[in-house]
Amino acid sequence: MEQHIKDSGGYEAVVVEDGVRNLAVDPATRAVIRTDDVYQTEVEKGVAGYPQRAVDIAAGYSNAGRIEDASAIGMAGRSKRGENSCQIFMKVDDASGRITHATFRARGSLGTIASASVAATLCEGLTLPEALAQVTDARIHEELGGELPRGGAMGPLIAAEAVRAAVGDYHYRAGADLARLDELCPCDSFSRGCLMCIKCSLRETRAELLVARAKAAKAANAAKATPGATPAPKAEAATARA
């Protein structure tokens, strides 16, 4: 089904609805991927500079969407010079710690979309430690067929950080406190990934745990100063997230 749309300047586009993709098409130059789970924001340069494999992955992914009963969800991204972000959803077998299913949602450049799809694919079948070690921005770059143009170059790093955030979320839901989280899913605040990803769900989780620790310490000190006071609650009690 096609719809011809003209804007106030007389520019005509064709909206094609095929049940799988909603494509806003400039017939002479470009197609834009915009669905409920994937929203391409970089449209001016089309596919210029992208390896063909990256274009094929961005156009032909089949692993987008939420996992409604996900064991873990991780998000990472940045909004400087345009928004680029992704979520990774994981289903994990608790007995083995192995990722049985992974999907993604993404917003941004073709590089971010393709990277998120590759990251989710790479996660499947790995244990959580293996996912941290193997699903790196370098590996994602390799799977995409080479270097990406400037507008999409951050995609692999964002996707790798989203995987790390999902692994951290799994451990947090399982009851890990801050010390245990540092052991199972360590974060380097001065790493390239942490510095570049302004948005990170694992950073937010760690901040919540730090605040809980500070509040518990403050309450414990107040209890010591007040004889007969109710003992302070235990710090860093993890609660499962929706």
Image (cartoon, rainbow, N blue to C red):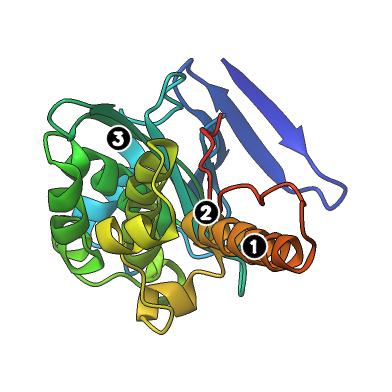
Q: Quadrant of the N terminus?
A: top right
Please name the residue shown 84% across and 53% down the image: 9
Identified at 25% across, 66% down, the residue is 137
**Residue 158 x, y percent position in the rendering:** 40, 62
Q: Nearer the viewer, mark 1 or mark 2?
A: 1
Query: From the viewer's perspective, is residue 18 above or below residue 234?
Result: above
Label 3 environment density (alpha carbons within 10 Å; few <14, some 14–19, many ≥20): few
Mark 2: amino acid: Ser
Residue 96 has which mark? none
SS at circle 1 = helix
Amino acid residing under circle 1: Val
Q: Can you say whether 40 is above or below 80 in the image?
A: above
Question: Where on the picture, by quarter, is residue 122?
Answer: top left
Residue at mark 1: 211
> Is residue 77 shown above or below 193?
above
Q: Is residue 43 visible?
A: no
In terms of depth relative to the viewer, which is nearer, 224 or 181? 224
Contact check, label 3 and label 1, Cβ < 8 Å: no
Q: Name the residue at the front extreme.
A: 227
Residue drawn at (30%, 35%) of the image: 60
Distance CA(mark 1)–CA(mark 2): 15 Å
Residue 188 image-quadrant placement: bottom left
- Label 3 residue SS: helix
Q: Which residue is mark 3?
A: 60
Q: Nearer the observer, disc 3 or disc 2?
A: 2
Query: Do labels 3 and 2 touch, CB within 8 Å?
Result: no
Calculate the distance from the C-alpha at mark 3 to the C-alpha at mark 1.
43 Å
In this view, the residue in front, 27 or 203, is 203
